[in-house]
Amino acid sequence: MDYTLKELEEMKQIILIAIPKEISARDFYLNAAKKFKTQESIQLFLSLAEQEKGHEASLRKILKDIEENIIKIKNSK
């Protein structure tokens, strides 16, 4: 699917907002893991932190793709 430059710029801005939220959520879960004593609770929070790390990585990949498409559109003008 082809997107317009405006649509790509909007998606980029959304992702730039989302990435710090993923980092913040990961930090929250890591800190929560430190406050619990049971291995089950610690593992739960560490698992959630890993998921947030994966979300961040996915968003960064999408951001890279979007930025490459923005460059292509700008260079084609």
Image (tube, rainbow, N blue to C red):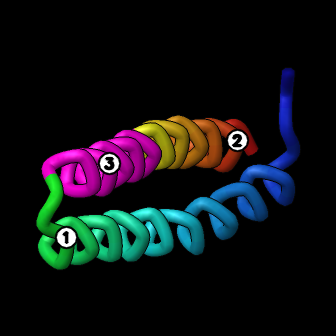
| Mark nearer the N terminus (2 vs 3) | 3
Q: Which residue is mark 2?
A: 73
* Mark nearer the viewer, 1 or 3: 1
| Mark nearer the N terminus (2 vs 1) | 1
7 and 77: which one is in front?
A: 7
Expressed as whole percent of the image width and height from the top left, the position of residue 71 reads: 56, 45
Q: Which residue is mark 1?
A: 36
* Mark nearer the viewer, 2 or 3: 3
The answer to whether the residues at label 2 and label 3 have Cβ atoms under 8 Å apart is: no
Can you say whether 25 is above or below 47 in the image?
below
Q: Which residue is mark 3?
A: 44
User: Distance between the Cα atoms at labels 1 and 3?
Assistant: 10 Å
**Left or right placement of residue 24 versus residue 70 in this view:** left
**Left or right placement of residue 54 versus residue 69 in this view:** left
Identify residue type, mark 3. Leu
Residue at (42% x, 69% y) in the render: 25
Q: Quadrant of residue 38?
A: bottom left
Can you say whether 42 is above or below 50 in the image?
below
**Left or right placement of residue 49 versus residue 20 in this view:** left
Disc 3 on helix, strand or loop?
helix
Q: Tell me, yes or no, whether the highlighted magenta stretch contains residue 31.
A: no
Give the numbered dot on residue 21.
none
Q: Which residues are magenta?
A: 39-57
How many other residues sit within 10 Å of disc 1, few (<14), some (14-19) or many (≥20)?
few
User: Distance between the Cα atoms at labels 2 and 1?
Assistant: 50 Å
Can you say whether 75 is above or below 24 in the image?
above
Disc 1 on helix, strand or loop?
loop
Expressed as whole percent of the image width and height from the top left, the position of residue 4 reads: 87, 45
